[in-house]
Structure formats: structure tokens, C-alpha cells
Amino acid sequence: MIPPRPEDPFLPRMVGYEIQRVPSYRAVKAYTCPGCPQTVPAGQGHVVVWPVGMVEDRRHWHLHCWRLAVRRGRVA
């Protein structure tokens, strides 16, 4: 059994959402950030965010864009 990862204290959190950091070496595809809608290119570290219990709804965000969304208190 794999132990759970400790929470990253540097990632901003929002109630109702899970967040996971994607390091640059694991970023193998390009995605469209829902925060800005610019490309998160392959090879760029970013975060993946999804509503609690709905991992199929995960979205790939620039970390800066996610920080702004948390500061605003809303995802959309």
C-alpha cells in the first residue's frame, strides 16, 4: 500500500477542490488553462484541479492562474 502524499503547503487551496502539482518532467501533453485560456505547454510544470470526488472533471491550470482563482474565491 502506498502512503498518501503529504499536502504541499505552497499550493493554494479552495474548499471543495482537490489539487495536485505536475512537475515539468511529468508534463508530457499540452493543455488549455481554464483560467486564462492560454496553453499550458508540454514540459511546463503546472497544477491539476478537480472538484472533490469528481476526478474525471480535472483541469490543468497554470499555477499563477490557479492562485488568482483562489484569491477571487471562484473557479470560473
Image (tube, rainbow, N blue to C red):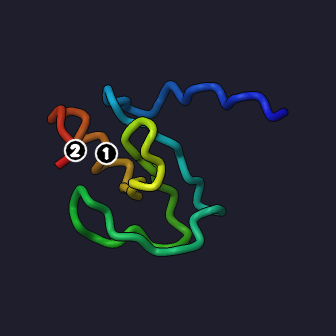
Residue at screen point 37% across, 29% down = 13
Disc 1 element: helix
Contact check, label 1 and label 2, Cβ < 8 Å: no
Vertical relation: 36 (above or below) 28:
above
> For this rendering, which residue is in front, 57 or 24?
57
Q: Position of residue 48 (x, y in %)?
A: 45, 51
Q: Amino acid at mark 2?
A: Val
Q: Residues within 10 Å of mark 1 (few under 14, many from 20)?
A: many
Between 59 and 44, the one lying in front of the other is: 59
Residue positioned 36% across, 55% down in the render: 61
- In the rendered image, which quarter is residue 25 located in? bottom right
Q: Residue at x 18, y 32 (%)?
A: 73
Residue 75's mark? 2
Task: In the rendered view, tell whether residue 57 sits above or below residue 19.
Answer: below
- Secondary structure type for disc 2: loop
Q: Amino acid at mark 1?
A: Trp
Kindly indicate the quadrant of the structure image that contains residue 28. bottom right
Write down the quadrant of residue 27 in the picture: bottom right
- Name the residue nearer the viewer: 2 or 39: 2
Q: Nearer the viewer, mark 1 or mark 2?
A: 2
Left or right of 3? Residue 76 is: left
Name the N-terminal-most of marks 1 and 2. Answer: 1
Question: How many numbered marks are there?
Answer: 2
Kindly identify which residue carries mark 1: 66
Measured from the top left, where is residue 56 in percent x and y?
Answer: 45, 55
Drawn side of residue 40 relative to residue 45, left or right: left
Return the x and y of residue 7 as percentages of the image width and height: 56, 26
Q: Measure the C-alpha gap from mark 1 to mark 2.
A: 8 Å
* Residue 18 sits above or below residue 9 on the image: below
Q: Position of residue 60 (x, y in %)?
A: 41, 58
